[in-house]
Image (cartoon, rainbow, N blue to C red):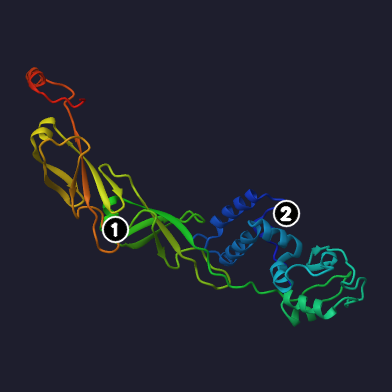
Amino acid sequence: MAFKDYYQALGVDKKASQDDVQRAYKKLARKLHPDVNKEPGAEDRFKELGEAYEVLRDPEKRSKYDRFGHAWKQAEQRTGGAPPGWENVRVEYGPGFERDFGFGSGGFGGGGGGGFEGGDSEAFRSLFEDLFGGGGAFGGAAARGGGFRAAGRPRAPARRGADSEAELELTLEEAARGGKRKITLADPASGEHQTFEVNLPPGIRPGKKLRLSGQGGAGLGGAGRGDLLLKVKLRPHSRFRLRGEDLHVDLKVTPWEAALGSEVEVPTLDGDQRVKIPAGTSSGAKIRLRGKGFPSAGGNTGDLFAVVSVAVPKQLDDNERELYEELAKVSKFRPRE
């Protein structure tokens, strides 16, 4: 059978490092991606490239591929590993490509006889039928220098495309409100931008994932594409802090509003709402607004907590200073006692 050289497909040497393999794949994937390259055969080359990278990026798979060639997977499935004597067999995969495995006791016959000698010939026949595509491959084998030429080519199994993952950054308001939203993402292989429409459930939380079926990596052997997973991330908000289903917001009040009590406006996701500040309120006190927090998947809504902070003026005019000095003289309030 025609040997599929994964190293040649990626354009790297057999001694290439894992980083070299990855760089070569990314470079070629950008050129051959079907969305970019419309030349005949580009899609097949892209699939072959993905197949080669899938094997060579994995040290264990790469090691087995280096031993058994393109038949590494079938050999492992058929025997649970290489049969006795395999490491010493010489197999010719195609013109100009030969692998020397030597010759072990009880293995294949050497010389030019071309048949099986010694050992369990039926077991080896069965193994090679599995490796090289059945009777057609084995029947076309010709002994040459103690090796075999396979006439057929094993069919690559269909494989669903890999799932891809991307980050979806939302504002707090977008996550709370939900609804349809268009997003544009860059394809890491081609560099091209794609636009998707997603339907956000109201109250979606950071870390949750949205699945877009069939928008992931391309499949092999006619299999379907993988899925695209969008992981939600919330942008930091200038006012609100999300704590579970509750929202927290800082509420600054003047010393007299805190001391005498007042009505002030508190920001919420639905707009400002007026609330009462009880007389004698200190910094750190929390005012609770029920049902004004963040919505949940179950249809409930958390609460909003306005955290009071008493703010004082950084500069005083003469009149203000005089009043504060008078207050300091007459007040019996001693917070540190």
Q: Which of marks 2 and 1 is nearer the N terminus?
A: 2
The spot of residue 215 in percent (x, y) is: 45, 64
In the image, residue 335 sits, relative to residue 117, either above or below, namely above
Name the residue at 20% across, 53% down. 292
Mark 2 near mark 1, Cβ–Cβ under 8 Å? no
Which image quadrant is residue 309 in? top left
In the image: residue 220, left or right of residue 282: right
The spot of residue 318 in percent (x, y) is: 9, 17
In the image, residue 7 sits, relative to residue 107, either above or below, namely above
In the image: residue 300, left or right of residue 149: left
In the image: residue 58, left or right of residue 144: left
Look at mark 2 in the image and give the residue it sits on.
14
Whole-angstrom CA distance, mark 2 to mark 1, is 52 Å
Which image quadrant is residue 93 in? bottom right
Name the residue at 10% across, 31% down. 256
Q: What residue type is labelled 1?
A: Gly
Residue 66 in view? yes
Residue 140 in view? no
Circle 2 SS class: loop
The spot of residue 243 in percent (x, y) is: 30, 49
Q: Which amino acid does label 2 sit on?
A: Lys
**Residue placed most toward the observer, 277 or 84:** 277
Residue 122, which numbered label? none
The spot of residue 280 in percent (x, y) is: 12, 35
**Residue placed most toward the observer, 17 or 94:** 17
**Residue placed most toward the observer, 319 or 109:** 319
- Circle 1 crowding by C-alpha within 10 Å: few under 14, some 14–19, many from 20: many
Quadrant of the frame with the C terminus:
top left
Look at mark 1 in the image and give the residue it sits on.
203
- Circle 2 crowding by C-alpha within 10 Å: few under 14, some 14–19, many from 20: few
Circle 1 SS class: loop
